[in-house]
Image (spheres, rainbow, N blue to C red):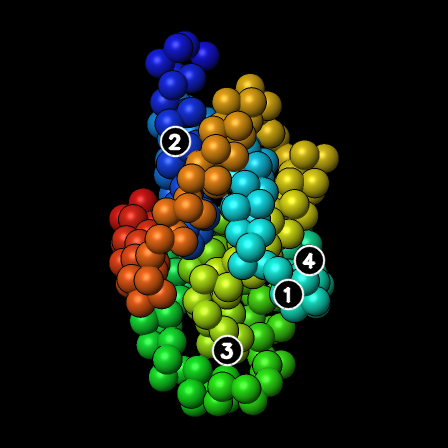
Amino acid sequence: MTLHDLLFLAGAGLLAGVVNALAGGGTLVSFPALLALGYPGLTATVTNAVALWPGYLGGVLGYRAELRGQQRRATVLSVAAVLGACVGSALLLLTPGRLFESLVPWLVGFASLALLAQPWLRKHLGGEEGGGTSRLVYAGVFVGGCYGAYFNGGMGVVLLTVLGMFLHDNLHRVNAVRAALSLVISSVSVIAFSLFGPVRWQAVAVIAPASLAGGFLGTRVARLMPPAVLRGVVVVFGLGVSIALALR
């Protein structure tokens, strides 16, 4: 690996960490970077998943204040996230998944539009403020865990959309729970891919610390945004991810 390759991967890891902390989707930065350096698709996927784990950790640490008082909520939802991540990891390691990959742009695009319509969806599907949490959130988090472990790109958009519909809280606090669930899902896939996947550890050693720094930076950027602006940024980025995936 040349110095140029090292700097290229470090920059991709930093930017991916920032994007993941904001709303998720950093894979669409680091995954193409690995492909550009000649890594095969499956190798790039599992290497990317392992390398971005520190970025998710950085995001959770950066959201410590917003996570206070939400430990029980995050723990209960993590059970559904772990189950989904186990299924998604197994699918990636055991099947080609071409049909699923063809659906990915549509899934991310749908999630982005659902986030745009979140206030209306919350009223009609999630119940009124103070009315409790719908059980549908667990099914949504399970699907998000399956999707996130199989293909990480846009996982944060999917999770934030689901949580935003059914958790009646400030968007920054909801985004903090999203960050915690993303870390849980990533942890499951990292264990599975480290044991059974073709991980390139040299690339991991470059991207991982850069994504950790990006995770810290991203939470600070997100905290400065009003909820409406944050929602708009996530929607625009999610639709961009969907278009990029479709073109790829």
Q: Residues within 10 Å of mark 3 (few under 14, many from 20)?
A: some
Cα–Cα gap, marks 2 and 4: 27 Å
Q: Residue at x 59, y 23 (%)?
A: 201
For residue 168, the mark is 3
- Report the side of 158 relative to 142 (left or right): left
Inspect the image, locate mark 3, and give the three-letter code of the amino acid beneath it: His
Image coordinates of residue 154 in percent, x first then y, are: 43, 54
Cα–Cα gap, marks 4 and 1: 21 Å
Mark toward the viewer: 2 or 1? 1
Residue 103 shows in the view: no
Cα–Cα gap, marks 1 and 3: 14 Å
Q: Residue at x 39, y 52 (%)?
A: 222
**Residue tagged 1:** 69
- Report the side of 161 relative to 109 (left or right): right
Describe the element under mark 4 as helix, strand or loop: helix
Inspect the image, locate mark 2, and give the three-letter code of the amino acid beneath it: Ala
Q: Residues within 10 Å of mark 1 (few under 14, many from 20)?
A: few
Circles 4 and 1: CB atoms closer than 8 Å:
no
Describe the element under mark 2 as helix, strand or loop: helix
Mark toward the viewer: 4 or 3? 3
Dot 4 or dot 1, earlier in sequence: 1
Image coordinates of residue 233 in percent, x first then y, are: 30, 57
Circles 2 and 4: CB atoms closer than 8 Å:
no
Work out which quarter of the rendered image holds the C terminus and state it.
top left
Describe the element under mark 1 as helix, strand or loop: loop
Dot 1 or dot 3, earlier in sequence: 1
**Residue tagged 2:** 12
Work out which quarter of the rendered image holds the N terminus and state it.
top left
Above or below 166: residue 207 = above
Question: Which of these two is toward me, 134 or 199?
Answer: 134
For residue 82, the mark is 4
